[in-house]
Image (spheres, rainbow, N blue to C red):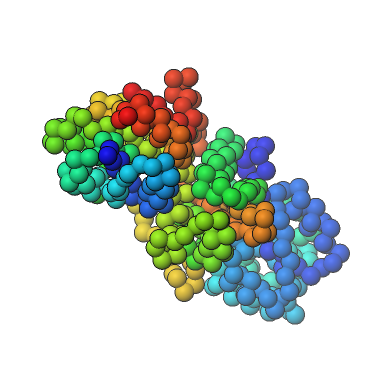
Amino acid sequence: MSDDLDLVSKVLILDNAVEHFDTIKQFCDENGLIGLRIHSNNVLRTLNSYVDLGGIFMAEDYAESLEKTIELASLIRKTRPELPIILRRKSDSSNVQSDNLAKCFVDSYTIDDLSPLRKFIDDYIFSIVYPNALIRGITEISVQSLQSQFKAQTVTANAPYIVRDRIIFGEVFSLIPLESNWCRGYMMLQTEESILDSLVVSDVGLQYSQTPFRELNNLLGEVTNLIWGSFKNRFINDDVDRANRSVTQVPLVINHQNKYISFGSENPQLCFKYTLLDEATGLFCSIYQWFIFNLDFTPELFEEIQTTVDDLIDSGELELF
Amino acid sequence: MAKILIVDDSSTVRDQVGEFLTENGLDFISAIDGKDGIVKLQGDPNIKLILSDVNMPNMDGLTMVEKIRNELGNSTVNIIMLTTESNPSMKERGKAAGVKGWIVKPFRGESVLTAIKKLIE
């Protein structure tokens, strides 16, 4: 987990034991987790929507019986195999076939010993160390880039978080490769077309010269380009020997019906959420940004590029040669 | 009347810059990449300034500049790069190819007016 910047992650808490709520809540608060509780009837429906989860805590008596709980866990595993599930058992000696457990749960814990729960989040959610300068820098450059394209709106950033989910948010997304000596992967921006459209047309004087969706695609593309450019300028040293960089690639798989995207890696992803708010109308639009370092991530080689005084030309300013 | 050629694969940028130029009484045409930029330049002798992106499909902006200077032999048209790139080695490449100035995006109108004043008026 990042040392002092607060990375968080959402976990689904499938546990009805009122007497343990406080203990689990305290654990979540102390470990950067946002716990979401839902009724058992809604589990699969919730998992099929965009909830950007990091993992699932499940109690062995969550369903009517242990067998039913295991059945539900199996269904969850089928639906969302990328989400690790940890089981809360009533006691260490609870009578459960271990192979049945292993198929559905990555580990188990009891309320008296939360150390397996701690190990669970370290291994499956906060398993990658993201440098503070990277997280802070991404937020800064993204807010600036968004603000430059959405001048009439106020842009804010939520706390960055970690997800294992592969569900795509909204209908439109952009992808751009990130290539450096310390990272290889993609940046993805996702948003909802109709809401972005409402926000953009609320700008005084805007007239579409193309079909609206094409205009919105181009706008999202330009925001992506601006963030990518700033990311490269701030974090990627092009002078480092390109010849020695890996050229490995893996296929990306997108399933439109299920709004699912796979980058071929099981690693959790670094995510940011930005909100564009039109103060006059109250309309707002969310933009989700994922950093998927699926091909390489070597934070030891990460460095923020130090610019010399001569290079300190603000964006937008003319530098004549 | 002197004309400005905007070369950018993003229609959002072409529209933003074009709208700004029109508001300031300036005439412009657009091209969608480096190849298109060369075609448009060859077809219009009134183009006195090119505002070009660097990263574009088909032909990037710096390759376009090199072709304009070396293959077309056009050493008079002024070229400013309007790009997200601020890498010093890329700027050096642009300078060596005959680029007159560099603006890091996002686009700011005053910088373009400054370039026009200094280079073509």
Query: Is B121 positioned to the left or the right of A222 in the image?
Result: left
Horizontal side, residue B21 vs residue A160: left or right: left
Quarter of the image where the C terminus of chain A is located: top left
Residue pushed farthest top?
Answer: A309
Q: Is residue A82 left or right of residue A262?
A: right
* Residue A226 in view in this figure: yes
Res A270 visible: no
Question: In the picture, which quadrant includes the N terminus of chain A?
Answer: top right
Task: Between residue A302 and residue B34, name the one nearer to us.
Answer: B34
The image position of residue A164, as x and y in percent, is: 56, 58
Between A120 and A12, the residue placed more toward the observer is A12
- Estimate the x, y position of residue A63 in percent, counting from the top left: 73, 77
Residue closer to the observer: A128 or B39: B39
Tell me where residue A130 appears, x and y as whole percent: 56, 41
The residue sitting at 51% across, 48% down in the picture is A149
Would you identify the image quadrant in which residue A147 lies? top right
A4 up-or-down from A77: above or below: above
Residue A129 x %, y %: 57, 41
Against A256, residue A24 (above or below) is above
Q: Residue at the location (71% across, 63% down)? A: A36
Task: Count up the numbered dots.
Answer: 0
Residue plotted at (47% across, 63% down): A172
Residue located 57% across and 39% down the image = A140
Query: Picture quarter containing residue A50?
Result: bottom right
Please determine whether, in this image, residue A267 is positioned above or below residue A298. below
